[in-house]
Amino acid sequence: MGAPLSVVGAESSGTWTVVPAQREVRATATAADTDFAEFVRIALPGLLRYGHALTGNPHDAADLVQTVLEKVGSRWLGRRAFCDEPLAYVRKAMANAHVSLWRRTRRESLVAELPDNAFEQFDRLDNEPLWQALRGLPPRQRAVIVLRYYEGLSEAEIAETLGISKGTVKSQASKALVTLRSSLEGR
């Protein structure tokens, strides 16, 4: 299939590019490789924004996008045969991967000493009340809110993307908005 891809970026400028993970690039590319590369080139900025909203920071977002694109890229030719909306498919895969990771790592481990974070780079949105409140939502509610208000998708598109019913989209959005409203009013 296609060459493995890596996501690299410059946080300060907000630019991201996809580069081959290996130094050698094949001289000839198949139509499927070109098709996937073009899809990634067009969709990457939006996928990184969506990933950032899901994970809460750009580094985890880049990891999430890279993981999902590697999986999708390895099966691109077969997926294109039955998937009319590859962007919706990738968004759903990102949401599923994020929820799976959250489930595996949600247990906190206590440490005797706090790590020294003096030199850690901070995300410029970390101190924004809305982003803090968004991070407090359960993963599915966060995904619904991000897709609805950040990506501008309709309820039907969100339902298709996440593989849930329109009623579930409405109820998750309603619950999330109540939680966000109470969280932001309490500040």
Image (cartoon, grey):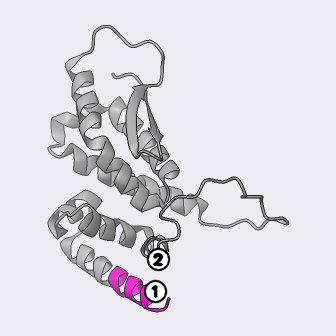
Residue in the picture at 36% in, 30% down = 74
Based on the picture, tell me whether residue 180 belongs to the magenta stretch. Answer: yes
Q: Is residue 149 above or below residue 121?
A: below
Disc on the earlier residue, 1 or 2: 2
Based on the picture, tell me whether residue 113 belongs to the magenta stretch. Answer: no
The location of residue 152, given as percent across then percent down, is 21, 64
- Image quarter where the N terminus lies is top left
Density class for disc 1 (Cα within 10 Å; few <14, some 14-19, many ≥20) is some
Residue depth check, mark 1 versus mark 2: number of the one nearer the observer: 2
Residue sitting at the far right? 112
The location of residue 106, given as percent across then percent down, is 59, 65
Q: Main secondary structure of the magenta part?
A: helix
Q: Is residue 169 above or below residue 80?
A: below
Residue bearing the label numbered 2 = 129
Helix, strand, or loop for circle 2? helix
Nearer to the camera, 176 or 169: 176
The location of residue 47, given as percent across then percent down, is 33, 48
Residue sitting at the far top? 27
In the image, taking residue 11 as reference, residue 77 lies left or right, namely: left
Residue in the picture at 42% in, 61% down = 54
Residue bearing the label numbered 1 = 183
Helix, strand, or loop for circle 1? helix
For the record, the magenta segment spans 175-187
Nearer to the camera, 126 or 107: 126
Circle 2: residue type:
Pro
The location of residue 111, given as percent across then percent down, is 80, 65
Residue in the picture at 22% in, 65% down = 159
Distance, label 1 to label 2, CA atoms, is: 9 Å
Circle 1: residue type:
Ser
